[in-house]
Image (cartoon, rainbow, N blue to C red):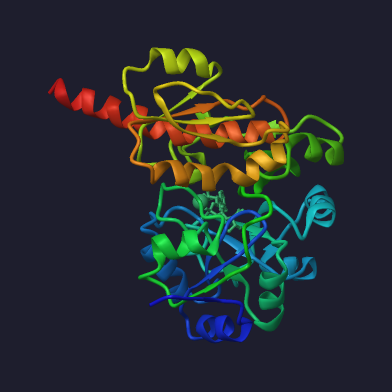
Amino acid sequence: MVKLGTDINEAKRILQSGELVGIPTETVYGLAGNALNPSAVKKIFDVKERPNYNPLIVHIGEISQLKKYACQIPSVAQVLAEKFWPGPLTLLLNKQRLVPGIVTGGLDTVGIRVPNHPITLALLKTIDFPLAAPSANPFGYISPTTARHVKDQLGDKIEYILDGGPCDKGLESTIIGFADGKPILYRLGAITVERIEKVIGHPLEIQDKANHRPLGPGMLPYHYAPITNAVLTDDIYHAIAQTNVENVGLISVSTELFHPKVRVNRILSLANDLEEAGKKLYSTLRYMDNQDLDLIIIERMPDFGLGKTINDRLEKAVARKEIKSMLIDASKSY
Ligand code: TXA
Ligand code: MG
């Protein structure tokens, strides 16, 4: 049976023996193993049921360790790391040979960040290896933002979860890569595009999804998905009027809405605070997914700042169902 606790030495012992531990970060909980031990890294892919071409983020305890695992670091990458670490920014950089290929899915680049959570930072300081850690959810499902979420889904597959309380940001890190030294956004995240642009001094180039093979599940069109059918809308009144099911869950930005079809209504932030909405997003999706609903109607966020990140996750959460029904329709015609 998995144990939850705050015993850093216990976590260290398990990690040193090549096994996995659930760890808190400021973004979401991670499923961590010794990044320099290929057999520990393989266990991460197995436990998550994640395809092995999909690279993992390497977590280090301080910026001074960056050069040990990455090389040819563009000067703007160094500036961004100094500005935002510890924090929710992952940099894609050329890897040093020390980083096993299994961590990067065979790519020459490695995703690296210094997470900002006191327990995990303390853990990283007591071990002499970095931690490879994807979000601690089964592949394709909603990311965990409490130790309990990790226990509910991976509890029979790992020994120990470091319990660091609910995650402060509740959304994954922003991922930035580089081409000829120029930053490119690969994944919207807990640091807004606006904040990055303020540091780099020009508009941030966005990875054009249409022209690249998907590099990871964060970049696949569906991800972060509940099991229940879900739709995303700008107009919750219209969406409720349109649906022919009776048993609806509604996730709204700030409006409380009473309607006979709406069995549960959760508001992400009464004060329209996007940080608060981001922090509550995944736990609210999880809650709704456990209510035995026929449909979850979700209100789109304003399209700036963290609203952009939240909308990105919501689009992927609902896309899964659309893609699934497209596939079913396609299979019917054969
Ligand atoms: O906030 C976060 O980033 C959390 C916490 C635990 O740190 N981690 C996280 O990991 O979200 P994961 O594995 O769920 O998502 C990492 C994303 C994946 O889409 C992966 O494909 C991409 O980062 N990634 C990692 N290394 C990469 C690389 N070298 N090139 C391109 N994409 C990379
Ligand atoms: Mg993930």
- In the rendered view, does 126 fall on the left or right side of 313? right
Instruction: Name the side, left or right, on which 115 lies relative to 81.
Output: left
**How many discs appear?**
0
Q: Indicate the position of residue 104 as horizontal and vertical percent values.
A: 52, 59
Q: Write down the quadrant of residue 58 in the picture.
A: bottom right
Above or below residue 13? Residue 202 is above
Pinpoint residue 329: horizontal percent, then vertical percent.
22, 23
| Observer-nearest of 200 and 188 | 188
Q: Quadrant of residue 242?
A: top left
Relative to 216, say whether 106 is above or below: below
Left/right placement of residue 75 relative to residue 166 reads right
Name the residue nearer the viewer: 250 or 279.
250
Closer to us: 31 or 186: 31
The quarter of the rendered structure image containing the N terminus is bottom left
Residue 107, given in percent of the width and then of the height, sits at 52, 55
Say which quadrant the C terminus sits in. Answer: top left
Say which residue appears at 38% left-offset and 34% top-offset. Answer: 320
- Please report the residue visible at 67 percent of the width from the left and 53 percent of the height from the top: 90
Q: Determine if residue 206 is in view.
A: no
Please report the residue visible at 32 percent of the width from the left and 17 percent of the height from the top.
244
Q: Residue 133 in the image: state x and y as whole percent.
A: 54, 63
Query: Which residue is found at the position 78% from the left and 34% from the top?
Result: 194
Q: Is residue 315 visible?
A: yes
